[in-house]
Structures are given as structure tokens and as C-alpha cells.
């Protein structure tokens, strides 16, 4: 690639991943240029980002922001994701907001740095099929999937097993009685990573790891039985790949999302970045592993089961979980109610085997309404 400048559009620029992406870009101003920034409702931060990076295209969920006189062209998320000026599209928008622009980018044959879980979880079959048809490249931004991707580079044979590591969250040794008393403030204190609220809660319930199993299934074309989850509290090994001869490759680094973000941005190169923390082997005393407790953390089991069933089950899983997490954060339900709400939504769902995007959106809408109904009914009991 030499020293040519990559032109980037970042969807979700004011979120946790978006801000860390811009932090990486600040380190390499001669390698990356921002052509598009899209955000939710945090227009104060978006304004500061526009003033700093001077993109040509912008988007905000706040429609009043359009007339604020930024001087930039206003584009929809789909148009920004597929615009010919962008060399790389970073999709860091959270929830179902990332699905439509991901599909637009794929159909435009783009190179996509994907940080939005829900796109592949809910529509993996459609997105991977369309990516192959249009020659699009999907580069994972999640630290676990980036680790697997890096371990697979240069290999000519498929892996025997993918091993996803999980920190276990802050409550991995809690009893069911203790989990029932967990507050949002406690759940938002992740022991290893700095992330947005939704992902942090999902990490505490282990739902996040279940979603990553489904993602890995689509990203690396692996059957679910070849994907294993192990709890690794130190969060230094970000995932591992076992090969036919029993050899295992692992990717290690300090738990900092900027490592995997930078790798996706700079691929196929590795760029030196003095701002990223290096591991100090004199201070690392142990690397430990244990099996996840599926009885205590049923969200992981629910997610893997939904992934195996396929169809519209993963869409229901994501939507019900999103509603449940919002209700927990607003203290309308307890921590242990999150898996109950998700499980009930999945149990009552009539799945469609090979859904269209419209079917997936309909299942998402259904699940959100049902989860709210279940929560309201439970609160009246």
C-alpha cells in the first residue's frame, strides 16, 4: 500500500469505538483522512469532531443539526456507507441502526471495518452472501475476532477449533442470589475494558460472548461445534485458534480496543504506535482459564442456541436483549431478569428459516414489543 492515504467514513463517531477510532487516526494524520462522520444525538461532540477532522459528509439522528450551518453535505447512513469516495467504512453504530448501512456498504463492494455486532448476528447469512457476490471485505474490529483473524493469516488449512476468550465480567463468582441484587452501577464497572453501556452490561451477563460466537460462525465460516468459549480473567489473550495438528496460536496484547481498531484500519500493514500500552512481562504473574458457568449466566447459552437455530431467532435475541438492558439500566427490572426476558421472547417466537431483511426487521419489532409486554406483566405480578 505504501504511504497512500486511506479515506474513511465513520458511522457511530461519537460512541466508544468511534472515539477510539478517531484517537488512532490522530496518531497517523498522513495515513488517514476522514471523509464522513455519522453520529446519534451527541451533536456537541459531533460538532467538535467536524471542526477537527473537516469531513465532506455528515449525518446525525438529530435532524435539527442539519441546518446548523456546518458547511458539510448531509448524507443518509446508507449513502455515506456506500459513497465512492470512501476507501474504508468503519461501522461502529450500535444496535439495529448498523444493519442497513452495513448492507449498503457490502452491496457497494466496500472494505468494512465492522464493530456492529447486530449486523452479522441478525443477518449473517444475507451479509456474507452479499459480500461474496459484490467482492466486499469485512474486517473485524472486535478484539476477539481480530485475534482470530490475525491467527488465521498465512494459514492454508481451516482451523480445527476457534477459542473465544471472555473476561467473565465482574460477577463471575457471584451466586444467583447475589446476581439478583446487582445494580446498574456495579454492572457498568467492567474489570478489564472501557466500553459503552450496552456492551458493558452484555459483558456482565455474558450475552456479549454469545453474540461473538454467532459472529465468529459467519466471519470464519465455522460450525458452532468448532467454536468454544473459555473464561480468561486477565483479558490478555484475546482469542486462540487450534489447528489440525493440535498447535494453537494466540494473539496477546494489553486490553485496549485501539489495537484491533488500528489493525483493521492499517491492514495489511502494522503501524508503530507509541500511544498504545505494551505488555510488561515482569508484571504478568499468571494467565488463567476456566469454563463459563452456563447455569449462572444463561445468556451465553441462549445466544448459542439462537445462533444454532438460525432464522429470525438471532434477531429476536438481539432485540429482546437490547430492551432488557435498557430496562435494567433504568432500574425497571433486575439483573437476573435480563435472561428471563430474552428467553421468554425466544420461546414465544415463530421463526422464519431463511429470512429477508424485511423479515429480520419485523422480528426485531415483534421482539421489542413482546419484551416490553413481558416486563410490564412481570412488574404487575
Image (cartoon, rainbow, N blue to C red):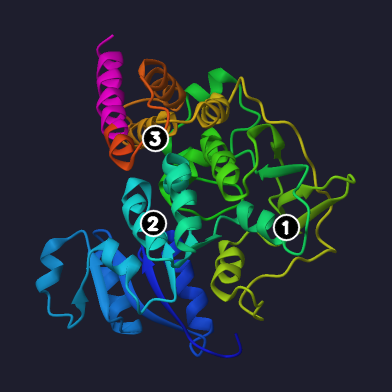
**Tag shown at residue 315:** 3
Residue assigned mark 2 = 102
Residue span colored magenta: 363-381
Q: Residue at x 76, y 49 (%)?
A: 241
2 or 1: tag closer to the N-terminus: 2
Residue assigned mark 1 = 152
Q: In which quarter of the image is residue 375?
A: top left
Mark 2 surroundings: few (<14), some (14-19) or many (≥20) residues within 10 A: many
Element class at badge 3: helix
Answer above or below: position of 183 versus 101.
Answer: above
Q: How far apart are marks 2 and 3 (CA)?
A: 15 Å
> In terms of depth relative to the viewer, which is nearer, 122 or 335?
122
2 or 3: tag closer to the N-terminus: 2
Disc 2 vs disc 1: Cβ atoms closer than 8 Å?
no
Placement of the N terminus among the 4 image quadrants? bottom right
Q: Is residue 180 left or right of residue 61?
A: right
Answer above or below: position of 349 versus 35.
Answer: above
Amino acid at each position: 500500500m505504501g504511504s497512500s492515504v486511506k479515506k474513511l467514513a465513520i458511522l457511530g463517531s461519537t460512541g466508544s469505538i468511534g472515539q477510539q477510532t478517531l484517537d488512532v487516526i490522530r496518531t497517523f494524520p498522513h495515513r488517514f483522512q476522514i471523509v464522513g462522520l455519522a453520529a446519534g444525538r451527541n451533536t456537541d461532540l459531533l460538532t467538535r469532531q467536524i471542526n477537527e477532522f473537516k469531513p465532506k459528509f455528515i449525518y446525525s439522528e438529530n435532524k435539527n443539526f442539519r441546518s446548523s450551518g456546518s458547511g458539510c453535505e448531509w448524507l443518509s447512513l446508507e449513502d455515506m456507507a456506500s459513497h465512492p469516495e470512501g476507501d474504508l467504512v468503519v461501522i461502529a453504530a450500535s444496535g439495529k441502526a448498523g444493519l442497513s448501512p452495513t448492507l449498503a456498504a457490502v452491496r457497494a463492494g466496500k472494505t468494512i471495518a465492522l464493530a456492529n455486532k447486530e449486523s452479522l448476528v441478525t443477518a449473517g447469512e444475507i451479509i456474507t452472501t452479499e459480500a461474496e457476490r459484490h467482492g466486499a471485505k469485512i474486517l473485524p474490529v472486535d478484539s476477539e475476532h481480530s485475534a482470530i483473524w490475525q491467527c488465521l493469516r498465512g494459514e492454508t488449512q481451516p482451523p480445527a477449533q476457534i477459542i473465544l476468550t471472555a473476561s467473565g465480567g465482574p460477577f463471575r463468582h457471584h451466586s444467583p442470589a447475589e446476581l439478583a441484587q446487582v445494580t446498574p452501577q456495579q454492572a457498568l464497572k467492567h474489570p478489564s475494558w472501557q466500553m459503552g453501556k450496552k456492551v458493558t452490561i452484555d459483558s456482565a451477563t455474558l450475552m456479549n460472548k454469545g453474540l461473538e460466537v454467532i459472529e465468529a460462525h459467519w466471519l470464519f465460516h465455522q460450525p458452532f461445534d468448532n467454536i468454544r468459549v473459555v473464561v480468561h480473567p486477565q483479558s490478555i489473550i484475546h482469542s486462540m485458534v487450534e489447528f489440525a495438528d493440535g498447535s494453537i496460536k494466540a494473539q496477546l496484547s494489553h486490553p485496549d480496543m485501539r489495537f484491533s481498531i488500528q489493525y483493521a484500519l492499517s491492514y495489511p500493514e502494522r503501524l508503530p504506535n507509541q500511544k498504545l500500552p505494551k505488555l510488561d512481562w515482569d508484571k504478568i504473574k499468571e494467565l488463567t482459564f476456566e469454563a463459563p458457568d452456563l447455569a449462572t449466566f444463561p445468556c451465553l447459552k441462549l445466544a448459542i442456541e439462537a445462533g444454532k437455530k438460525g432464522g429470525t431467532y438471532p434477531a429476536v435475541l438481539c432485540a429482546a436483549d437490547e430492551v432488557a438492558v435498557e430496562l435494567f439500566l433504568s432500574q425497571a427490572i433486575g439483573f437476573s431478569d435480563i435472561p428471563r426476558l430474552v428467553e421468554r421472547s425466544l420461546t414465544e417466537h415463530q421463526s422464519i428459516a431463511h429470512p429477508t431483511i424485511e423479515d429480520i426487521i419485523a422480528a426485531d419489532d415483534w421482539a421489542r414489543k413482546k419484551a416490553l409486554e413481558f416486563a410490564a406483566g412481570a412488574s404487575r405480578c
